[in-house]
């Protein structure tokens, strides 16, 4: 059922950008194929698969393995490069009124900056910097593992583009609030919390890892409580919007993220199971708000109620460090 | 003998047949074993789902049962479709968590299907007679060719291979649409590539092979690739690969193809699962 005669204002603001609703795809789980089952003009934004400057073939197979309530992937960002993106992929989105957010990655801060500069063109609404990838200047450690490397790459990106800049963080760091603060201090317009959780699975028939890349990133409903906690922490740490991403399968999940402090959310793995998940959530979100007389979905953001007596032990707020 | 130019399947522009794709709950009409290994599943679905083409597939949301808790959907090629009765058929071998869950379905249960997906087999109007070569689970994928070819007035010779005669499926189905069926099995030592090549060469000599259609065996695919080059015949192969999304989003089901000497990576779910025989790599 389409959203008609709605009295609920679903729009949210991400920095200077207003989205018609807070629901968008997670990078890597969205492409033209989804057009067959849902109308991209209903989404808050379109977020592309990460592109790189260089051609990348991706990881050896198998690239995915399932575990209860979750998926582990090691796709390896296969990319046909910038020219292919501009010539073949981008025109596909020109017919939609939905903001196009382009996810980018590079092995160096300079590489990120030059790619962002090249993509600062009409038709692209925002840049999502996937800084969860290995940084060759730091021994392959992902940029978003540490505040210093996050600050450096974000600063270079900020100089390179005047487009809204979203920085996608990794959940694999114990310093997430610091990393989020570093992104904010160096000019990010929003942080996306988060990418997949580093994980592994072993085949008991062969004693070999299930993935060609040995390790991969965990996603799906199993990660939701972990990423929700990180969204809560980051939203407390920064004033820029936090975009939640981790295990969202339905409207309740999305609302949980919003009240934990997310200004918008990304839906990824759930689309593989139910391809219409995003539009279902948009419809249900409207009903959820209407049912509770909530006039604006943005009123949900950060609405979690924590009594003073319930303040969590600080040690538990940062359990890894 | 036709000397067709090989068709190029699965390029980016051709990969989106403008047929509707649906995600829907279907009603299970039948789900019964047909031999020691295979189950035959029939569901009632929408006209859109029943309009699937031979070679296309559906992503099935397999039920959970006990230890079997499949997370992802499972791709399953269409075994039969009938838009008039709104029926969709699958033939599957119980091998893992997904198919163990499927095997628990009973008439009256519901099954969530997503499809039809991918590019199916295509026919050239000038073809008079084609050859379908399948083995194992590939027999199910090739089965709907029998009806599609007959509707176009194209004769089919089916060479069906299995480990044992009792595991041969689709034989009656092919015959019911007027196909000639040759069965070969490991137990009778007739299924080796040399014997299949001998059969194919005689079909080519008799002008009964305007094109190859194959699924389920790399060895038999290589035999046909060799003959396709030798006699300049076109061919199509339906390929398998582990999938997650089924609609080209995730790039987990890629395979390499040899396109005029260049190795090209393609997504089986989106660019296929039916590909040009001559470009396929085992």
Image (cartoon, coloured by chain):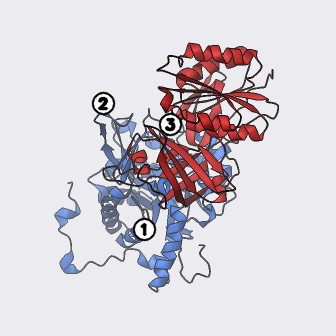
Chain colours: A blue, B red
Please tell me how crowded label 1 is: few (under 14), some (14-19), or many (20+) other residues with Cα within 10 Å. many
Query: Residue B276: x, y in percent?
Result: 66, 30
Q: Mark 3 points at which residue?
A: B241
Callouts 2 and 1 on one subunit = yes
Does dot 2 land on a helix, a strand or a loop? Answer: loop
Query: Residue A314: x, y in percent?
Result: 19, 66
> Image quadrant for the C terminus of chain A?
bottom left
In the displayed structure, B24 sits above or below B211; it is below
Does dot 1 land on a helix, a strand or a loop? Answer: helix
Query: Residue B45: x, y in percent?
Result: 60, 58
Q: Name the residue under label 2.
A: A206
Say if residue A20 shows up in the picture. yes
**Horizontally, is B243 left or right of B125 in the view?**
left
Residue drawn at 41 percent across, 74 percent down? A301
Say if residue A123 shows up in the picture. no
Instruction: Name the disc covering residue A254, or none.
Output: 1
């Amino acid at each position: 059922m389409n959203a008609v005669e709605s009295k609920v204002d679903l729009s949210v603001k991400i920095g200077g950008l207003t989205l018609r609703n807070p629901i968008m795809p997670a990078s890597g789980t969205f492409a033209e194929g989804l057009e067959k089952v849902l109308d991209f003009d209903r989404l808050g934004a379109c977020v592309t698969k990460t592109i790189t400057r260089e051609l990348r073939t991706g990881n050896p197979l198998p690239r995915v393995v399932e575990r209860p309530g979750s998926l582990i992937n090691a796709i390896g960002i296969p990319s046909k490069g910038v020219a292919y993106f501009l010539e073949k992929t981008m025109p596909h989105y020109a017919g939609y009124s939905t903001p196009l957010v382009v996810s980018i990655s590079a092995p160096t801060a300079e590489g990120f900056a030059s790619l962002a500069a090249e993509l600062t063109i009409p038709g692209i609404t925002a840049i999502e910097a996937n800084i969860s990838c290995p940084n060759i200047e730091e021994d392959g450690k992902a940029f978003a593992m540490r505040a210093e490397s996050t600050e450096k790459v974000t600063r270079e990106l900020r100089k390179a583009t005047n487009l809204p800049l979203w920085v996608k963080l990794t959940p694999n760091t114990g310093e997430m609030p610091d990393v989020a603060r570093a992104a904010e201090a160096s000019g990010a317009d929003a942080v996306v919390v988060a990418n997949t959780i580093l994980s592994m699975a072993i085949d008991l028939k062969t004693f070999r890892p299930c993935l060609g890349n040995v390790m991969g990133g965990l996603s799906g409903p199993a990660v939701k409580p972990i990423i929700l906690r990180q969204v809560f922490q980051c939203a407390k740490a920064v004033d820029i919007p936090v975009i939640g991403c981790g295990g969202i399968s339905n409207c309740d999940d999305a609302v949980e993220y919003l009240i934990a402090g997310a200004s918008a959310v990304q839906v990824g793995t759930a689309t593989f199971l139910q391809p219409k998940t995003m539009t279902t959530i948009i419809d249900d979100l409207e009903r959820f708000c209407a049912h509770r007389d909530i006039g604006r979905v943005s009123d949900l953001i950060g609405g979690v109620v924590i009594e003073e007596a319930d303040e969590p032990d600080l040690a538990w707020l940062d359990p890894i460090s | 003998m036709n000397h067709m130019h090989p068709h190029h399947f699965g390029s980016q522009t051709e990969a989106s047949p403008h047929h509707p794709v649906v995600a829907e709950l279907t009603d299970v009409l039948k789900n019964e074993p047909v031999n020691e290994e295979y189950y035959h599943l029939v569901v009632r679905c929408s006209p859109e789902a029943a309009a699937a083409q031979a070679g296309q597939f559906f992503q099935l949301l397999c039920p959970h049962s006990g230890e079997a808790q499949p997370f992802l959907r499972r791709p399953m090629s269409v075994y039969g479709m009938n838009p008039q009765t709104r029926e969709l058929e699958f033939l599957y071998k119980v091998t893992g968590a997904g198919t163990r869950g499927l095997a628990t379905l009973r008439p009256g249960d519901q099954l969530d299907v997503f499809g039809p997906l991918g590019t199916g087999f295509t026919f050239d109007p000038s073809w008079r007679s084609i050859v379908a070569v399948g083995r194992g689970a590939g027999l199910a994928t090739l089965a709907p060719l029998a009806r599609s070819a007959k509707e176009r007035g194209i004769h089919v010779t089916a060479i069906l291979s299995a480990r044992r005669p009792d595991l041969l499926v689709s034989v009656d189905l092919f015959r019911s649409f007027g196909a000639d069926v040759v069965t070969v099995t490991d137990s009778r030592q007739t299924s080796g590539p040399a014997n299949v090549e001998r059969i194919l060469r005689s079909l080519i000599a008799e002008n009964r092979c305007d094109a190859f259609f194959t699924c389920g065996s790399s060895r038999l695919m290589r035999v046909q690739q060799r003959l396709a080059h030798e006699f300049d015949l076109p061919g199509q192969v339906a390929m398998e690969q582990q999938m997650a999304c089924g609609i080209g989003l995730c790039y987990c089901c890629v395979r390499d193809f040899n396109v005029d000497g260049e190795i090209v990576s393609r997504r089986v779910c989106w660019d296929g699962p039916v590909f040009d025989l001559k470009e396929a790599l085992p």
